[in-house]
Image (tube, rainbow, N blue to C red):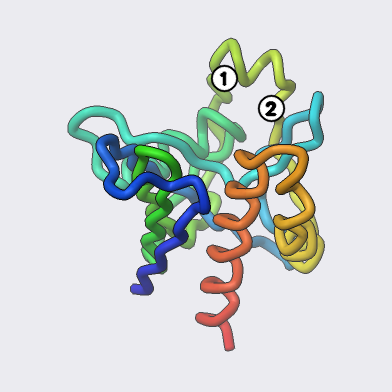
Amino acid sequence: MKTVEILGANRFETFSKTRAGSRAVVVRDGMILLSREAVTGWRLIPGGGLEEDETPEACCIREVEEETGFIVKPTRQFLTLYEYYEEYRYVSHYFICEVTGTGRMRLTDAEKRRGLEPEWLPFPDAVAIFARHQEYAEISEEQRGSYLREYTALEAYLALRT
């Protein structure tokens, strides 16, 4: 498994808060499953934060169902990514997953307001979207950082395939 660090330009000397989560790379017939905000068009690899006493694998399964309605089975953890922004250290565990069924989306009120929906996109298109992460630096540091994270993860995923 690969480990990568991303050091944000706005990071503090030391971090005082940690947020951990899991994300699922689900590829089927050349398409990747993403979570897309209909209001903004912002896309992310499905996933989210670990709950108390939850394993990264269990978090991955729960978050994908909540955001997309798909039930997945993690087959391999291939990346742990550490990001440092301001006083935070973000830890993202990335899993390769297979769809095993359908469940029920359970969106938060904020996700409902943003119009979060599942989207299957050709894999090369997703890579191209996330590769443009630097274009968002002037607009939103959060989006720039998120897209850099997702681009880094997809590059690590591709490296496994070659």
| Quadrant into which the N terminus falls | bottom left
Q: Position of residue 60 (x, y in %)?
A: 41, 44
Residue lying farthest left? 53
Q: Are discs 1 and 2 less than 8 Å apart at CB?
A: yes
Residue at left 66%, top 16%? 112
Q: Position of residue 97 (x, y in %)?
A: 49, 57
What amino acid type should be assigned to the residue bearing mark 2? Leu
Earlier residue among tags 1 and 2 = 1
Q: Residue at x 57, y 19 (%)?
A: 107
In the picture of the structure, the residue carrying the numbered disc 2 is 116
SS type, badge 2: strand
Identify the amino acid type marked 1.
Leu
- Between 152 and 48, the one lying in front of the other is 152
Q: Secondary structure at mark 1?
A: loop
What residue does disc 1 label?
107
Rendered-image quadrant of the C terminus: bottom right
User: What residue lies at 40% left-to-right and 63% top-to-bottom?
Assistant: 5
Q: Nearer the viewer, residue 100 or 10?
A: 10
Tag count: 2
Circle 1 packing at 10 Å, graded few (<14), some (14-19), many (20+), is: some
Tell me if 122 is positioned left or right of 64 in this view: right
Q: Is residue 137 left or right of residue 41?
A: left
Q: Quadrant of residue 40?
A: top right
In the image, 60 versus 113, the foreground residue is 113
Residue 43 placement: quadrant: top right
- On residue 140, the disc is none
Left or right of residue 156, residue 81 in this image: left
**Image x and y of residue 58, in percent:** 32, 41
As measured in the structure, the alpha-carbon distance from the residue carrying label 1 to the one carrying label 2 is 8 Å
Q: Position of residue 115 (x, y in %)?
A: 74, 22
